[in-house]
Image: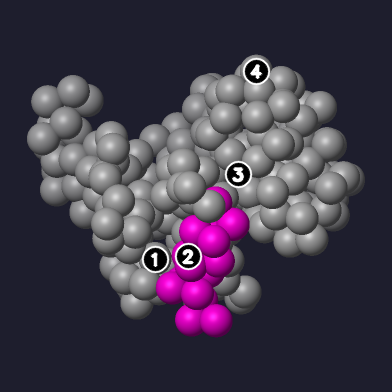
Amino acid sequence: MAKDVIIALDFPDRKTTLDFLDRFEGEKPFVKIGMELFYGEGPSIVREIKERGHKIFLDVKCHDIPNTVEKTMKNLAALDVDMTNVHAAGTIKMMEAALKGLTEGAGGNRRTLLIAVTQLTSTDQERMESDILIKENINDVIVKYAKNAETAGLDGVVCSPLESEMIHGSTGEGFITVTPGVRFADDAKGDQKRVTTPGKARELGSDYIVVGRSITQAEDPVAAYRRCVKDFLGA
């Protein structure tokens, strides 16, 4: 399976986003459209970026009752994105419903990868126990959620790169890990807790890394992207 660097387009509006992408000229990096941009601009921004030739990870993290998630995914299938996601905490039944909706919405010919968030990279053991009353070890919870996603038929999970190795060791071949929480060694962590560098993410087995501020807030985003690709892909 091809590995790749995904740029998180964490921008508030269409103009800022497209001005950023214009800096890449002939390059067409894989990009992530998150809730901020999607809720601000709607499906039209997905279509416009897709028409420009970019692969898209639509990061909307659906988490609701199975029937609602199924219908949502059926609608999202029409956008023909390359990857989208749900929260694994929604249970196996919800994830199965998401997969059903996505597949039916694509007319039975699903091309969109469906992955599940295990635990947000802003969550650590302390917060997990104090805020959401999960007392188990965070790594055990993450592996269990990954196994649930696999049972539901999903293609992989979103997790910290620090957890890629144990997830690959607990799931079947071809089950992918998509890992935010990636920073250059000389960058601040921001609000992330479980983070590492692109090179370390490669060593730990991440299939895709999602990089935001280290690229989008760099003085030269194109150079930062190329540095990230070199560090992660060894190219």
Residue situated in front as seen by the camera: 213 or 128: 213
Q: CA distance from mark 1 to mark 2?
A: 6 Å
Q: CA distance from mark 1 to mark 4?
A: 30 Å
Please tell me which residue is depicted at 26% across the width and 44% down the height of the picture.
189
Image quadrant occupied by the N terminus? bottom right
The answer to whether the residue labelled 3 contacts the one labelled 4, judged by CB atoms less than 8 Å apart, is no
Left or right placement of residue 55 versus residue 147 in this view: right
- Name the element at disc 2: helix
User: Which range of residues does the magenta coloring cover?
Assistant: 221-235
Please tell me which residue is depicted at 19% across the width and 47% down the height of the picture.
138
The secondary structure that most of the magenta stretch takes on is helix
**Quadrant in the picture for residue 225:** bottom right
Determine which residue is flagged by label 3.
Answer: 32
The spot of residue 45 in percent (x, y) is 76, 30
Left or right placement of residue 103 versus residue 92 in this view: right
N-terminal-most mark, 2 or 4: 4
Please tell me which residue is depicted at 22% across the width and 25% down the height of the picture.
132
- Name the element at disc 4: helix
Label 3 neighbourhood size at 10 Å, few (<14), some (14-19), many (20+)?
A: many
The spot of residue 142 in percent (x, y) is 30, 50
Label 4 neighbourhood size at 10 Å, few (<14), some (14-19), many (20+)?
A: few
Q: Which mark is residue 40?
A: 4
Determine which residue is flagged by label 2.
Answer: 228
